[in-house]
Amino acid sequence: MAPGHRSILIAGAGATGLAAALELARRGFHPRIVDSDAGPVPLIESRALGVNARTLTLLAPSRVTDAILQEAQQIARFRVVSKGRRLADLDTTTIAGPYSALHALAQGHTERLLVGKLSDYEVVPEWETSIVSVSDDRSKPRVTLRKADGSVESASFDIVIGADGAHSTVRKAIGIGFPGEALESSFYLADFRYSQPVDSHFAEISLVDPGMIGRLPLERYVLRYISTLPDFETRIQHPAPIAERVWASNFRVHFRHVDTMSRGNVFLAGDAAHIHSPAGARGMNLGIEDACWLAWLISEGREAEYTALRMPAVQTVLKQTRQLTSLITMRNPLAIAIRNLAVPVLFRLPAFSQRLLHGVSGYDTPPPPWIDGAL
Ligand SMILES: Cc1cc2nc3c(=O)[nH]c(=O)nc-3n(C[C@H](O)[C@H](O)[C@H](O)COP(=O)(O)OP(=O)(O)OC[C@H]3O[C@@H](n4cnc5c(N)ncnc54)[C@H](O)[C@@H]3O)c2cc1C
């Protein structure tokens, strides 16, 4: 059978599922993509706002990158401050390649750009349609779907992709565990819209000791604050009068990943396969990367290699985010003092700052072999 004629079902129309659908569609497949929600993430909920250089590389062939660059905010500098003193100031545009390390765009915008491009291939997500079960038949998995009107559909597919998030029904249905651990502390975030434009070209971490408050640009009028402190909003030094507190949330950080990303012709991608802290802004980007690799492997008839090729990338990113998270959540006063002394020294070392930028750009995982000259 010609690869393009294989029937493919994608569970989950988040960034991962949409990227998988798009990468398959532009190679001649016509996947079905279903999602239990009524539509993409609401625009008001910024959620995963960091889009890294690797994602821009991966979405360039489908031209989604052009659209992201039109809408996104470039994060040109990354700063670390403590008690009003600037410990580090990194120029993120110095990374080699066509893109700077990180841009900011609310997750709902990124998802809508993917949905829009997908419609060029006449692939439309089937919203309010949940996957409820996946059969044990590994070569031709049978899936049960429940639709908004309560009707149930049962169908078999050559390939099923579980991109249905951290609580993945697909992962549970095929009996793959999700080992790992949860951090004791939570993260808190709030997005503020100001009554006038604010300096939105840099991201900053203020070390409060113990704890931190991160400031990330979202738009010219909107900033995201993220912190390890429940009372962080009382400590923010706002750069302009507040027009509106747009969105707030808190979450507990887990570090988990599956031991295998596939069973037979059922594959897991994105948060369904791995979750970690938001430090480094890797989550959504790693999911998009899984999706693009899987689509390429399916088009080559090499999908059996998916776990072996992706697992090292997953492990690298979990390790990096764990290290960054322990740096910003440390509580021991001596360790904090040593860190604060070391940060200015380390950031002045070109080898250190380039390594950090390499990771933030997403370039610490294997480059996509199907894109010429990709870093
Ligand atoms: C506060 C916060 C900030 C973050 N910041 C960043 C960041 O800056 N950069 C970054 O890269 N990542 C960030 N992340 C992580 C990022 O949001 C996730 O990693 C990303 O959304 C994962 O995408 P996904 O498509 O794999 O999963 P999801 O976004 O969880 O999408 C899964 C989809 O599956 C659907 N679904 C679930 N169950 C079913 C079912 N049974 N049937 C059908 N559909 C189903 C859901 O409705 C959903 O649409 C952040 C996360 C949080 C919480």
Image (cartoon, helix red, strand yellow):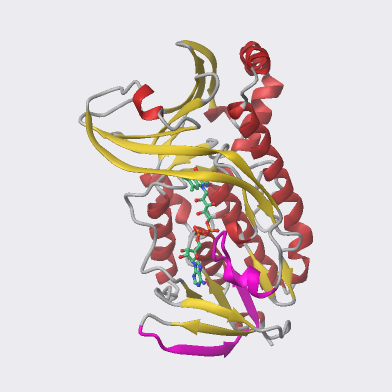
In the rendered image, residue 314, in percent from the top left (x then y), is placed at: 70, 50
Q: Is residue 173 magenta?
A: yes
327 versus 54 height, above or below: above
Residues in magenta, as a range: 149-174
* Lateral position of residue 50 relative to residue 361, left or right: left
Q: Is residue 34 left or right of residue 375?
A: left
The single residue placed furthest to the front in the displayed view is 184
User: Is residue 297 shown above or below 178?
Assistant: below
Q: Position of residue 349 (x, y in %)?
A: 68, 16
Residue nearest the viewer, comparing 27 with 86: 86
Image position of 363 with respect to 285: above or below: above
Tell me what residue is drawn at x 57 percent, y 65 percent.
Answer: 163
Residue 145 at x, y percent in the picture: 50, 82
In the picture, which quadrant includes the C terminus?
A: top right
193 relative position to 299: left or right:
left
Q: Determine the residue positioned at 66% across, 80% down.
A: 3
Q: Residue drawn 58% across and 57% down?
A: 271
- Please tell me in which quadrant of the rendered image residue 192 appears: top left
Which quadrant, please, contains the N terminus?
bottom right
Of residue 255 and residue 375, the one placed in the foreground of this image is 255
Q: Could you say where residue 52 lies in the image, as x and y percent from the top left?
A: 54, 43
* Visible residue check, residue 350: yes
Q: Classify 66 as above or below 125.
A: above
Q: Is residue 320 magenta?
A: no
